[in-house]
Amino acid sequence: MNNEDVLADVEKHANAIIRVCSGYQPAYGLLVIRPDFSCLNPVHATLDSAFDTPPTAELGTYILGRLPAELKLMVLRELDILSFFRFRHVSRRARELSTGLWEYNLVAKHGREGLRGLLRAGLAHRFTICDLYQPLITEKCSTCDAFGGLLFLLTAERCCFTCLQSKAHYHVISPRIYAMLSVIHPARLNRKSIPSLRTVSGRYTLTTTPVNPPKRLILAEHATQALLAAKVIKEDVIQVLRSQGDEQRQRYMATTLYPWYNLKNARPEYGAGCRGCQPPRGLYLDDQAFSARGFLSHFSQCAEAQRLWAESEGGTGPLGKPECARPYSFHSFFFSNWLAI
Ligand SMILES: [Zn+2]
Ligand SMILES: [Zn+2]
């Protein structure tokens, strides 16, 4: 196919191209904290709706009850997530008001992994609903230009798997090891109130040997900044930490899958790989995930995806097999969120 034909096809058959040429979920989804929908579904209805019975009481006769609705919503946007949920439990009126907050409603519907991740990690008091809303409506990784299918819980940033693995910014470490490497007493670290993440059990590996996570993890950058500012450590600690490296799997323990919500077509996307580029059988961690928009741009340069498209006769014929086909049997729940732009 020449370039003009490809661009014409992308314009005319965008949905069909995505259906034929993309689809499998890159393997990194198996490594990070994974959403358990069987756990989330029973509470889903209570998260994004108010009670059927209308409220009979106001929010009180003092300041909050007297504020106009817009100002009440502004106050709610400033609450940390833990306080937000406590407020939501106060009364039917409070629940009705908080359900009406657009940012909360979207996060409760499509960003539940983020809410659950922060609550379980003991970090919910450090972030507001808007801190989760912003990455939810942002397609790209916060440190590069690629699609980011993950949420890094210690900073509530969207990131891609490549950056999560390689950037020093995502270096996490157990407080005990940090104290040992920087030669300070662990109590001095605790006194600095550095955000720490409570880990949850999981595999965090593609091998059969499960990993025992440390109880807590901190971001090395947070600890270094706080201790340098307090003159507890010297700059040379940064070098020590760098030379020591970190355990990659601990980064996965601080990260969860997080869909991107496309405001233009009101659809969540988890990202999917290109069937033309998919590697030989087996799980490979360097698979790249694309948003629907990003995939169409990739398609115009991927000869193998174009070949699959040509073989499918405009999406009407049988799907062609990629050169190195592998079955995609896991995470089938992602596909329902993917097939349209
Ligand atoms: Zn990135
Ligand atoms: Zn490709």
Image: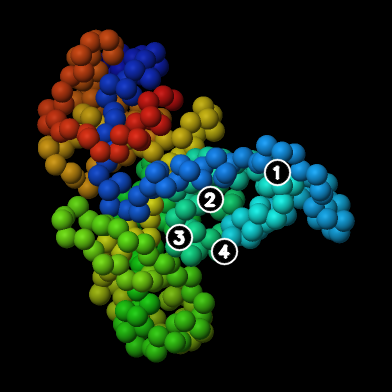
Q: Residue 120, labelled with which disc?
A: 3
Mark sitting earlier along the chain (1/2) = 1
Measure the alpha-carbon separation of dots 2 and 3: 15 Å
Measure the alpha-carbon separation of dots 2 and 4: 12 Å
Q: Secondary structure at mark 1?
A: helix
Mark sitting earlier along the chain (2/4) = 4
Q: Quadrant of residue 45?
A: top right
Q: Secondary structure at mark 3?
A: helix
Please name the residue shown 60% across and 45% down the image: 104
Identify residue type, mark 2: Leu
Q: Nearer the viewer, residue 30 or 38?
A: 38
Q: Quadrant of residue 216?
A: bottom left
Mark 2 and 3 residues: CB-CB less than 8 Å, in contact? no
Residue named by callout 2: 132
Please name the residue shown 48% across and 46% down the image: 112
| Quarter of the image where the N terminus is located | top left
- Callout 2 environment at 10 Å: few (<14), some (14 to 19), or many (20+)? many
Measure the alpha-carbon separation of dots 1 and 3: 25 Å
Identify residue type, mark 1: Glu
Q: Residue 96, labelled with which disc?
A: 1
Mark 4 and 1 residues: CB-CB less than 8 Å, in contact? no
